[in-house]
Image (spheres, rainbow, N blue to C red):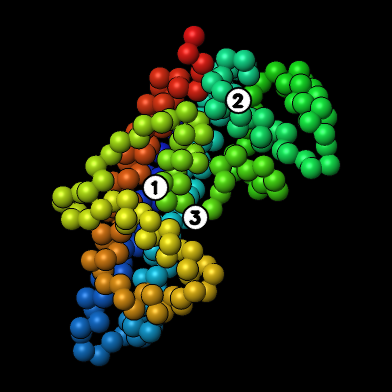
Amino acid sequence: MELLSKEHWVKQSVFLKDFLRGLSLRDSSQELVGLKSSDRFYSKYRSTLHAQFILMLYTTLESVVIQSVQDVFDVIKDQRICFERLNKEIQKIYIKIKCPIDDNKSREEVFLSILGMLKKEKIVDVQCQKPFKRGNPFKRGSLHVKHINDHILEKIGINRFVFEIYHKNLRCNIVEKISEISETCNKLAHGAESFQEYGSRLGIQDLRQYFCALCYYMHAYLRCIAKYIQQKGYLKNE
């Protein structure tokens, strides 16, 4: 079964690679004498485009990770697995999404609403990508490796996700690079630093290293999710 998260990652990674290649070609053309109008445009907005590329890396990370969780619930739905057969971690997510905490309701009322929901819905059907007003089981915020491990993977029952933290060929710490992508996105989104200021400090080699680090991490992450689904990790140990 081809997961939508993997399909999405393949398409986005090709787009990001092409985008990075275009930036690299434009950067090399800046050394030529007598720039064309298009090159003058790039020269003016080069820093902004470099910063934008980091933002694109983060949005790709977030969309693929959330889609991967949706893939898990889509498999559960397609296989028509009942609530009782799911492991307790998946059961908790299902209940939190379907019956978010309401301060105006007593514990008894919440308990009865959960019972009613379980009795009514024969198929476990969850939409992880919807906007949560309350009770988001994944504590959405800026995603980085620790957040993904603690608030997403462990929440669905994956307690061990191992990958090579320091990549010798890339000469960088993968965890640190993913965290820098996340922190940069947060700063740019909240105006702590302008796109021009941040992008002016980035060369093509910096962008390439961030991109390659994300590629390595996403390949390892998607293999982990595929293995979890293949081994039916969402089920109780019967």
Which residue is disc 3 drawn over?
142
Give the side of residue 139 with respect to residue 9, left or right. Answer: right
Residue at image coords 28%, 87%: 35
Quadrant of image for the N terminus? top left
Disc marking residue 91? 2
Residue at image coords 77%, 41%: 102
Give the side of residue 89 with respect to residue 147, left or right. Answer: right
Residue type of the residue flagged with mark 3:
Ser
Secondary structure found at label 2: helix
Q: Position of residue 118 (x, y in %)?
A: 73, 21
Gap between marks 3 and 2 measured at Cα: 25 Å
Q: Position of residue 64 (x, y in %)?
A: 46, 45
127 vs 123: above or below: below
Residue 52 visible, this orientation = yes
Gap between marks 1 and 3 measured at Cα: 10 Å
Q: Position of residue 157 (x, y in %)?
A: 47, 28
Secondary structure found at label 3: loop
Quick one: label 3, few (<14), some, or many (20+) residues within 10 Å? some
* Tags 1 and 3 touching, CB below 8 Å: no
46 vs 8: above or below: below
Residue type of the residue flagged with mark 1:
Val
Which residue is disc 1 drawn over?
145
Q: Position of residue 117 (x, y in %)?
A: 76, 25
Residue at image coords 45%, 36%: 153
Between 39 and 130, the residue placed more toward the observer is 130
Please tell me which of labels 3 and 2 falls first in the chain.
2
Which residue is the extreme one toward the front? 107
